[in-house]
Amino acid sequence: MCAEDMEIQASKNGPYIVKGEFVLVDGENKEIEHQNTVYLCRCGGSQKKPFCDGTHRKISFQG
């Protein structure tokens, strides 16, 4: 896998959008299953970390 196979974008006042082929691991180095596009929490308020659950809208996150 090379860097051209994935893209990471910080959305305005929202999550990181990660697209492509990549491996996502947790703090214990265990792989987290995911689709080819994931939305990762950037505001810190998600109840589904590392994934975004829309909390950034509720707390008026400015990023």
Image (cartoon, rainbow, N blue to C red):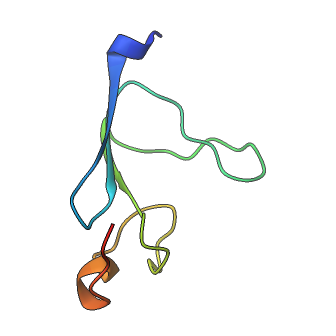
* Residue farthest front in this picture: 62
Q: Position of residue 47 (x, y in %)?
A: 47, 80
Number of labels in the image equals 0
Q: Quadrant of residue 24?
A: top right
Task: Say whether residue 22 is left or right of residue 10.
Answer: right
Examine the image and state in which quarter residue 25 appears.
Answer: top right
Q: Residue at x 44, y 77 (%)?
A: 46
37 relative to 3, above or below: below
Q: Position of residue 21 (x, y in %)?
A: 39, 24
Residue 1 percent location from the top left of the image: 47, 10
Task: Indicate the position of residue 51 as horizontal and vertical percent values.
Answer: 42, 62
Which part of the image, by quadrant, shows the C terminus? bottom left
Farthest-out residue, right? 28
Question: Is 44 located above or below residue 59 in the figure?
Answer: above
Residue at x 46% of width, y 81% of height: 45
**Is 20 positioned to the left or the right of 22 in the image?**
left
What residue is rendered at 26% in x and 85% in y? Answer: 60
Q: Residue furthest bottom?
A: 58
Give whichever of 62, 40 is nearer the camera.
62
Q: Which image quadrant is residue 19 in?
A: top left
Is 53 located above or below residue 1 in the figure? below
43 displayed left or right of 9: right
